[in-house]
Image (tube, rainbow, N blue to C red):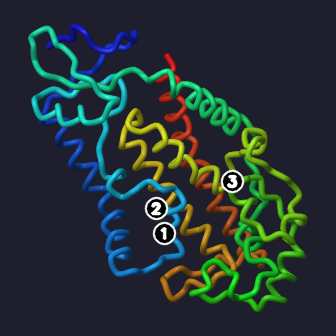
Amino acid sequence: MSAATLNPSPVAPFLLPEPAWHARAAAHEARVRVWTDAQRARTSRGEKHPVYDFLFNYYSFRPAWLQRWHPGPDIALVGESAREFLRWPEYRAVGLADSTSAVALAPLPSSRREYVEWLRALLRATQSRPAFFGCYGLHEWAMVYRQTPDEVRHNAHPLRFAPDELARIVEASPITCSHFDAFRFFTPPARSLNKLTPARETVPQFEQSGCLHANMDLYKWSFKLAPHAPSELIADCFALARDIREVDMRASPYDLRALGFAPITIETVTGRADYEAHQRAFTARAEPLRARLLTLCARLLA
């Protein structure tokens, strides 16, 4: 089977037979439903979860969207059932030499190029900058620093320290948060304690690959490229973000043992070493995902 009028790019499309892409779509859905079904069940019961809600509320990619499979660029889905993808404007029917029905992604529209160029520059800057492993997750502590109990974000769960002792720990620790979307949630008195002052417009100047939140955000960058991002890549980024979120909250001042999360006691030497070991492992896991996103950006801009 050969393609006659597919994507005008120099990359030859891979023709994916109907049984093959159905199998990939089913495998993707089965994988992510382990996460999405649990989230839906909690939502239906009106339960809030201080760890996992973040992955669906802050990142605002619905469970149904995460479950939905897309092949990514340069793949033509063969078969009549592929026409279901035409409900998304990013897809188009393509003609094959033997008149077989197929569907593929259209080239990236010009209105999306500016974003993809910005993202590629951000990923390159993050990749090139030395990783920093000395923050010890103090951003979560800075988010509750000098707050009253009613002001604490996850106030349904106790803090591990009384307010004065928590403040003493924060004030005795150098805070070096480089991630703007964490820094912007610092309490007003905590902001002056941070050695850095990241801002929205300076994100590419501060982002570095040792930061847990920068590596969690690979999930955000991947789904913002949907449906041009392969869903397997989005799921891989989600899996990393989920594991990071667990460690992020274990290292926080919240006591989440009732939910099964043992604290990482970053207020101790042992706890800081434990946190750094997790941080280094996540950085290593994030590197190939960041590289895959960069490859995708380059392909979409080709």
Q: For numbered disc 2, what is the local secondary structure?
A: helix
Viewed as shown, does residue 232 lie left or right of 23?
right
The residue under the point 48% across, 29% down is 296
Residue to which mark 1 is pinned = 53
Determine whether label 1 and label 3 are within 8 Å by CB. Answer: no
Q: Are marks 1 and 2 in contact (CB under 8 Å)?
A: yes
From this viewpoint, is residue 3 visible?
Answer: yes
Quadrant (top left/top right/bottom left/bottom right) for the N terminus: top left
Residue in view at x 33 percent, y 76 percent: 44
Distance from Cα at disc 1 to Cα at disc 3: 20 Å
Q: Amino acid at mark 2?
A: Phe
Residue under the point 87% across and 72% down: 189
Label 1 environment density (alpha carbons within 10 Å; few <14, some 14–19, many ≥20) = some
Measure how far apart labels 1 and 2 are at the Cα level: 5 Å
Indicate the amino acid at tag 1: Asp
Q: Nearer the viewer, mark 2 or mark 3?
A: 2
Q: Image height check: is 157 above or below 182?
A: below
The type of residue carrying mark 3 is Cys
Q: Whole-percent x and y of residue 173?
A: 86, 71
Disc number for residue 96: none
Q: CA distance from mark 2 to mark 3?
A: 20 Å
Who is closer to the viewer here, 244 or 54?
54
Spot occupied by residue 117 in the image (x, y as percentages of width and height): 60, 27
Residue identifier under label 3: 211
Is residue 270 visible to us here?
no
Q: Quadrant of residue 36?
A: bottom left
Query: Tag 1, which secondary structure?
Result: helix
Residue hosting label 2 = 56
Q: Residues within 10 Å of mark 2 (few under 14, many from 20)?
A: some
